[in-house]
Image (cartoon, rainbow, N blue to C red):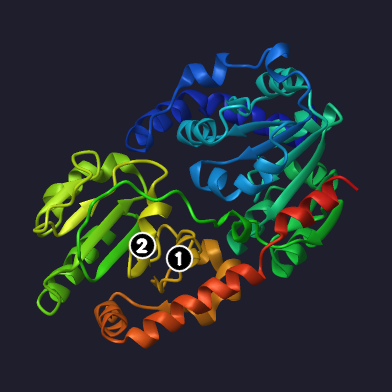
Amino acid sequence: MRIGLFIYNLLYGVSLPVLLTVAKFTSKKRGGFSVKRRFFSFPSESQVEGRDIWIHCASIGEVNSARPLIEKLKDRAIVTTFTDYGADRALKLFPEIPVYVIPPDMKPFTDRFVKSLGVKKLLVYETEIWPSLLTSAIEQKVEVYFVSGKITESSFSLYKRLSLVLKEIFNSSVFLARSDKDAERAKELGFAKVKTVGDLKFDSVMKPKPVNVSIGNRFPIIVWGSTHEGEEVLAGKIHVKLKEEFPQILTIVAPRHVGRAESLLSLLPGKAVLRTQSKNVPSDTDFYIVDTVGELSSFYSLGDIAVIGGTFNEKVGGHNPLEPMVFGIPVVLGPYYSHFQGVISKIKECIIFSTHENLFDKISLLIKNDELRHRVGVCGKRVLEKERSVTERILKEVFV
């Protein structure tokens, strides 16, 4: 084993008991963490027979975004995730595809895991880098592609510092970038082949099935999607101010981690109802809290305005702003969206940018101005159509 990878495995092994304990604790609100699933749920030959493509996604958001690619390859694919809730989402979307959680990133485990898959190509969505797992794949002659790859400024600095461990991985992998900026960084890191194909998130946005809920004649309906700590408080303050002028307002809140949903009942300043409590929203409800997985995109269809969570929490860096656009409703973003800068650079003319301080004014203006609300919504819908076909460009590069 090369010295850099040896040191990494040594440090990882020493830290593993602590890492597992921390992961078990921090995942309680995110769907749980199974140690057994990581150590003992290796595929058998019969489970993966005839499947030669391995698609890896970090978690639930990445599974959703990679959906068009997985759909195209579903007869040949095996899907892996890092998180349990990501795997559960993949199983729900693709019950016919084998889905596994990757093992701890130590060579004895990753060697066995890769061998059990028996695949020819690995497609890593965005840039989920596990040194031992990727090294095991490369050593076993698996072709590695980073698809719709992204390298943020902070990640770029980190990867350069870890060049002793990562250099050979990059030299043996193909990087299919989401943007020219990501491609430039990949070239500097030394990837074997680099090409810009676009952001797969544009292909992943599609109209979902209608949501089974009875709301009645409410206006406006503000949907806060994928919220984090502090953002629900902000949603509550905005709601209270708007209600003075718009008494029929309904605020729908979908926390990023559904384990936090119940705590919002006492946090929000008004009558709040959980999705799992009732599919009928009483007329005096102020906040309808989505405590289910996979329904957020359907709830956007009910909204007059969408506010994207994670963009008002500096620690998060934003979430996908594209899902509401398919319905032609205006999208409001806060000041923090570093994780989606590539996407936002292409849709910035169709976004309402806001700060904490002027959020009320921005939303109020959209409610009052029907023409503005319609124009911003239509703009986003048109951009979505223009930026599609990323899946086809990826497949063309992978299956030359």
Q: Position of residue 78 (x, y in %)?
A: 68, 29
Q: Residue at x 35, y 31 (%)?
A: 25
Q: Is residue 265 left or right of residue 60?
A: left
Q: Give whichever of 18, 185 is nearer the camera.
A: 185
Q: Give whichever of 92, 65 is nearer the camera.
A: 92
Q: Position of residue 223 (x, y in %)?
A: 31, 62
Q: Quadrant of residue 56?
A: top right
Q: Secondary structure at mark 1?
A: helix
Q: How many marks?
A: 2
Q: Position of residue 96 (x, y in %)?
A: 61, 27
Q: Residue at x 66, y 68 (%)?
A: 387
Mark nearest the camera among 2 and 1 is 1
Mark 2 → mark 1, Cα distance in angstroms: 25 Å
Vertical arrangement, residue 390 with respect to residue 49, above or below: below
Q: Quadrant of residue 219?
A: bottom left
Vertical arrangement, residue 323 with respect to residue 103, above or below: below
Residue 379 visible in rendering: yes
Q: Is residue 330 left or right of residue 222?
A: right
Quadrant showing the N terminus: top right
Q: Give whichever of 290, 333 is nearer the camera.
A: 290
Q: Is residue 398 left or right of residue 302?
A: right
Name the amino acid, label 1.
Phe
Residue 230 visible in rendering: no
User: How many residues crowd mark 2 within 10 Å: few (<14), some (14–19), many (20+)?
Assistant: some
Residue bearing mark 1 = 327
Residue bearing mark 2 = 313
Name the amino acid, label 2.
Asn
Q: Position of residue 129 (x, y in %)?
A: 66, 43
Q: Residue furthest right?
A: 400
